Image (cartoon, grey):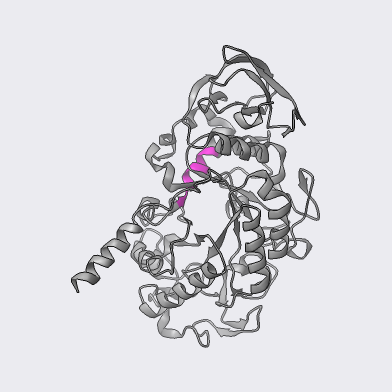
Amino acid sequence: MSKLLALASLVSLALAAPAPRQASGKEVIIQLFQWNWDSIANECRDFIGPAGYGYVQVNPVVEHIQGSQWWTDYQVVSYQLHSKRGSLEQYENMVNTCHAAGVKVIADVVFNHMAGLDSGTGVAGSSFWHYDYPGIYQQQDFHHCGTPGDSIQDWNNRWQVQNCQLAGLADLATESEYVRGKLVDHANDLLRLGTDGFRIDAAKHIPVDDLWAILGRLSGPPSYVTQEIYYGGGAGVTPDEYTGLGQAQAFQYAFDLKSAFEDGGIASLRSPESSGYSPSDSDSSNTFVANHDTERNGQTITINSANNIYTLAHVWILAHPFGSPTVLSSYQFSDGDSGAPNGNYGTCYGNGGTNGWYCQHRWAPISGMVGFRNAVQTTGITDWVSPSSQLVAFGRGTEGFVVINNTDQGWSSTFQTSLPAGTYCNVIDGVKNGGSCTGSTITVGPDGSFSYNVGNRDAIAIHSNARI
C-alpha cells in the first residue's frame, strides 16, 4: 500500500505543472474550425508548417448527431472516431501529414456531456436516446440533479454548474469510475493515433478533481492541454483552479482586448494585471482574439469589427509575451448556427480564403507575426514607448520590435530598439525571400534606431530572422 501511495504521489507531481510550451519555440496554435481532416492535412503541408505554426487545433474526433450546424460536432453519440470531418483513417493520415510538416495536433475533446436530443442516429449510424447510448452509457451514468429539466437554473450555484445539464446536453457523471474509464479509453485512442494534445470543451462544468483523475490515467502525458473555462457567469469557478492540469483559455484577456482596441487604449495592456492576470500566469494562459463561440456572440473583437482592430489585436497577442496564442481560422456565416461551407473542405488561396472560408491564418500580418513570435520566443519587453493610449511600440530584446498605431492619424517617429544594425523585412506586409523582402523594409542604424511613418490603423514589425 505504501508503494501504491508513493506512486500516486509521483503521478500527481508529474501532472502538477502546466503542460510546457513546445520546446522548439513554435508555440502558436491555429484553430482550423470545422475544417475536415483531408483539408487540414493539405494545409499543414502547404502552408501551416512552412509558416511556422506549432500546433493545429481540430474539431472533436467522435461520432456526433446529424445536422449541418457547427454545434452538432459537440453532441457526442459514440466514441467511434468518425465524424463529419472524416473517418478514422483520414484523421490518422492528417495527423501524420501535419507531423511531417512539423505541426502538432490538438484535438477538441468533449468529456462533460453527450447529446441533447431525446433520440436519433449519429453520423456513423449509431442509435441513441437521451440517457441511453447502447454499449456505452445508460441512465445511471448521467447526472440527474433534480432541477427542472435537470438543467442549470442558478449560475451562481457551483454544484448546479458542475452537476446539471448545460443547454439540455446529457451531463456525464464524471465522478463515476466507469465513466472515467470510457473517457480515458477515448483519449488514449486519440493519443495512439498520434494526437499531441487536447482542448477540453466545457471544462468549467467538470469538477477539477474529476479531470485530474481522467488525465492522470492516460497512457502518456499529452504535450499540451488547454481548457475552456469561461471567466465569469457566477458560481465562483475560476481558471486558476484548473491550471495545474494545463493552460486555461484566457477569456478575460480577450474581453479586455476588445475594450482596449475599441476605446480604452491599448497601452493599458502592457501588463496582464489589467485583465486580472498576474505576470506569472503567462505559462498557464492560452490567449486569443476570438474563438468559435465569441465570434458569434460579440463578446470579443471579430472579423467584422471596425478600423482593422481584428488584425491589430492579432499583432498584439503575437508580439506580447503573455500567454500562448491561438489564431482562429474560420468561415463566413449567415447566422450563428451555420456550419462550414464547401462540404467542410477548407480552401485558401494566396493570403486569403475561397469558397466561403476566411483563412485568417494566411493573412500577411498574422502569418508574418507567427515568424516574429518564433524569433523572439520568451524574450521580455524592452524599449517600450507610448506617447498616447492608442500608440504603442516595444521591443523583444535584441530579437524583435513592433509598432502598433490604433488611431486615425499616421504616427511618424524615430524609434529606439535593441536590434543590431541592418535592413529588415516588415513582416506585416511581406516576408523574407532569400536576400530580399516581398514587402516593405526598415533600416536600423548603428545606434539601434530607425525612423518611420506608421499609417493609421496599421502596424510594423521586424525581427532577427527577417534581417537581410
Give residue 153's quadrant in the image: bottom left
Quadrant in which the N terminus appears: bottom left
Percent x, y of residue 232: 43, 51
Identify which residue is drawn at 22% across, 70% down: 3
Give residue 41's quadrant in the image: bottom right
Q: Is residue 443 visible?
A: yes
Q: Main secondary structure of the magenta part?
A: helix
Percent x, y of residue 355: 81, 55
Q: Is residue 227 visible?
A: no
Identify which residue is drawn at 56% across, 24% down: 392
Which segment is the magenta one? 248-257
Check the image and report above or below for 39 versus 115: above
Identify which residue is drawn at 67% across, 41% down: 367
Outermost residue, left side:
2
Q: Is residue 266 magenta?
A: no
* Closest to the observer, 427 or 357: 427
Q: Is residue 87 left or right of residue 263?
A: right
* Closest to the observer, 231 or 386: 386
Q: Is residue 255 magenta?
A: yes
Percent x, y of residue 68: 70, 69
